[in-house]
Amino acid sequence: MAFTYDETLSTARDRVRFALGDTNEATPLLTDETIDARLAISTEAETVAFLASGLAVQLGRQPERVTLPNGLSVSYSRADALRTAATTARSSAGTTRSTAATRDGEPAPAEYLAPGWRERWSTYDG
């Protein structure tokens, strides 16, 4: 599990790490291999969006508020910051993520969807 980061941002990996806030070798969020694998199939912006979304899910599973024994309460929202980074990266990549199934920008043909999917989705609140 390698971690490299150069503050001059000379490589795509460095720029991805910077965009994700993954610049501290002592507490890495991702390995070089993970970043490089995604960069091999995506642009930098798409890589940032993909990895930020994944990290947001992972961090979303951790508590956002911690109360210390002395009564001090600390709140943080790294997951929200990563979701924002993902949205920004998608925007700069010229891609958007839709929650609706689509094919070439059009709704997916019915044969690709589970029976009753559209009816259930149209009443979804979340």
Image: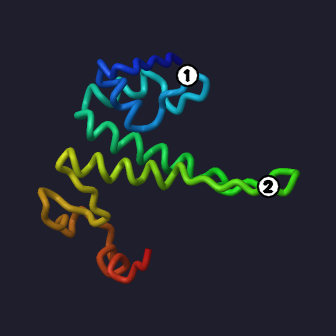
Question: Residue 49: where, in percent of width, then height?
Answer: 33, 44
Q: Position of residue 95 (x, y in %)?
A: 20, 51
Q: Which residue is mark 1?
A: 25
Tell me the kind of residue under disc 1. Answer: Glu
Q: What type is the residue that disc 2 sits on?
A: Leu
- How far apart marks 1 and 2 lie (CA) works out to 28 Å
Residue at the location (26% across, 63% down)?
A: 101
Q: Which quadrant holds the C terminus?
A: bottom left
Horizontal side, residue 121 vs residue 60: left or right: left
Q: Quadrant of residue 37?
A: top left
Camera-nearest residue between 21 and 37: 21
Q: Is residue 98 left or right of residue 105?
A: right
Foreground of the two, 48 or 70: 70
Which numbered marker is on residue 72? 2
Q: What residue is drawn where x is 46% and y is 51%? A: 81
Q: How is the image coloured?
A: rainbow
Q: Secondary structure at mark 1?
A: loop
Q: Is residue 76 above or below residue 93?
A: below
Position above or below: 46 against 120? above
Crowding near the residue tagged with mark 1, few <14, some 14–19, many ≥20 C-alpha atoms within 10 Å: few
Asked if the residue under mark 2 is in contact with the one under mark 1, i.e. CB atoms within 8 Å, the reply is no
Q: Which mark, by number, is residue 70? A: none
